[in-house]
Each structure stands twice: as structure tokens, then as C-alpha cells.
Amino acid sequence: MGISDADNLTIGQVARTAGLGVETVRYYERRGLIPAPPRSGGGYRLYPADTVRRLRFIVRAKTLGFTLQEIGELLALRARPGAGCADVQAQAEAKIADIEVRLVQLQAMRRTLSELVTRCDGEGSTSECPILDALLEEMP
């Protein structure tokens, strides 16, 4: 006996409701972030309504800088018996540390690019461009 169509959504409905493309939903399914849906009696893949909530969780976690692997770990923590809020807090603290490192790297990149821009007056050919010349040099 197939699942009830009334309580489930097509991939298009899930994607639209979550604000994603169909291919993105399929990708997250292939990555194991959402479970593969059961099939209806007619052979259609129908997703449970809570799939939208899970997809929104994935999107929000991505905007906070979590990788798909880290998101999978967070989702696993939620489902793992015995896991506690401290486990999630540790994941969030690790992400903050990663962001701090990236901020330092981005600031160094900005400083270097700003220095290169000040060397260039925007005149002449690209063969004499100080920015391109500096990019050809070996970095220390």
C-alpha cells in the first residue's frame, strides 16, 4: 500500500516552499542531508511536509557559515540519543573560531589589495599594470 498523497509534497512543492531549486533539493538528498522520500502507490516520490523545515535549517546553517558536512553533523546531533545542547554549542564555538581565522585572512587580503590599488594610476596598458605585475611576483 502506498503512502498518502495528501500528507506529502512533490519535489517541486518542497523546493518552492523552501525557496530552493529542485536540483538543490536533489543535491541535499544525494548528500544525505534529507532522507530519500518514499514512493506513492503511483510511483511518485513524495516528501513528508517536515522536509521543508529541514531544508530551511540547512539554508540557515549555510548562511551562518556551516559547511554541508558540518550541517550533517548538526542534524545527526539532533537525532542522536544522549546528545545535548553542549554538543551543539561546541560545534557553534568551533565555527566561530573558523570565522575569526577567515576574518584575519580577509583583512590581510584587503590590505594587500588596497596597497596594490594605490600603486596603480589606472593609466597605460595592462602590460605595465602594477597590480598584474605584483600578482605575477612570488608571494613571501
Image: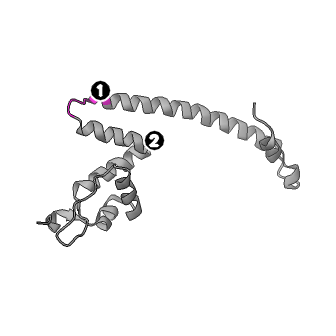
Q: In which quarter of the image is residue 117?
A: top right
Which is nearer the eye, 108 or 10? 10
Q: Position of residue 23 (x, y in %)?
A: 41, 62
Q: Decide: marks 1, 2 in contact (CB < 8 A)?
A: no
Which is nearer the eye, 16 or 12? 12
Residue at image coords 43%, 46%: 63
Vertical arrangement, residue 55 with respect to residue 104, above or below: below
Residue at image coords 37%, 59%: 26
Indicate the quadrant containing the N terminus: top left, top right, bottom left or bottom right. bottom left
- Which segment did they paint magenta? 81-87
The residue that disc 2 covers is 65
Indicate the quadrant containing the C terminus: top left, top right, bottom left or bottom right. top right
The residue that disc 1 covers is 86
Which is nearer the eye, 19 or 81? 81
Which is nearer the eye, 113 or 29? 29
Q: Is residue 82 magenta?
A: yes
Q: Is residue 1 magenta?
A: no
Q: Which amino acid does label 1 sit on?
A: Ala
Q: Where is residue 105 in the image (x, y as percent from the top left)?
A: 61, 34
Secondary structure at badge 2 equals loop
Q: Is 13 positioned to the left or the right of 71 in the image? A: left
Q: Where is residue 113 in the image (x, y as percent from the top left)?
A: 72, 41
Q: Which amino acid does label 2 sit on?
A: Gly
Residue at image coords 50%, 34%: 99
